[in-house]
Image (cartoon, grey):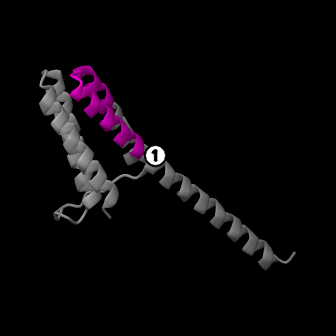
Amino acid sequence: MSNSIKIWACGLLAGLISLAASTALVHAEEDHGKKASEHLNEAIKSGKSGSAAGVISHTEQAKKELIEQNKDHPYTHIQKPIYGEHQKAEHDEEVFEEMDEAIDEAKDGHIQEAVEAVERASVHLREKEQSR
């Protein structure tokens, strides 16, 4: 084999490996988002059945999934943020704020308020997944 064919083959192999790695990263990110959404739905069900412990547990699990998702794809924040410029990051911040509020409300025994906060978090999570 000539050197140009060897170089071409190595380049092709490197391209295939990077494509496989990026595809795996996208699937891992989607899996964490899907699992977080499932946990939020379970938190809503728990709250509607009156279980503060269920709201707390499932919401904390959703937070863990989103933290893992953010490790796979971290957001960078610019010095002067412009509203609407970084939609995914903005929705992500709202999701975490609402989840924290839901946990606090559930710990205080305010189940209805906790459910409402989890529902808002769930909406922001869907909007995050749909945004650019």
Furthest residue in direction front, as rendered: 49
Picture residue at 53% right of the left edge, 58% below the top: 22
Farthest-out residue, right: 1
Query: Which secondary structure class fits the magenta region best?
Result: helix
Query: In this rendering, would 109 be left or right of 27?
Result: left
Q: Quadrant of the N terminus?
A: bottom right
Q: Nearer the viewer, residue 101 or 12?
A: 101
Which quadrant would residue 81 be assigned to in this image? bottom left
Depth order, front residue of 41/2: 41
Determine whether 48 is above or below 65 in the image: above
Within the image, what quadrant is residue 8 found in?
Answer: bottom right
Residue 43 highlighted magenta (yes or no) = yes
Label 1, residues with CA under 10 Å away: few <14, some 14-19, many ≥20: some
Where residue 34 appears, as percent x and y from the top left, is 41, 45
On the image, the x and y values in percent for residue 62 come to 34, 36
The residue at which mark 1 appears reads as 31
Residue drawn at x 12%, y 22% is: 108
Q: Is residue 31 above or below residue 23?
A: above
Q: Which of 33/123 is in front?
A: 123
Q: Is residue 109 above or below residue 27?
A: above
Q: Is residue 109 left or right of residue 128?
A: left
In the image, the segment drawn in magenta is 34-60
46 inside magenta stretch: yes
What's the residue at 21%, 29% (across, down)? 103
Amino acid type, label 1 = Asp
Q: Is residue 61 above or below residue 125?
A: above
Find numbered disc 1 in the image and state the secondary structure of the residue it sits on.
helix
For the C terminus, give its image quadrant: bottom left
For residue 101, what is the image quadrant? top left
Q: How many marks?
A: 1
Q: Position of residue 12 (x, y in %)?
A: 69, 70
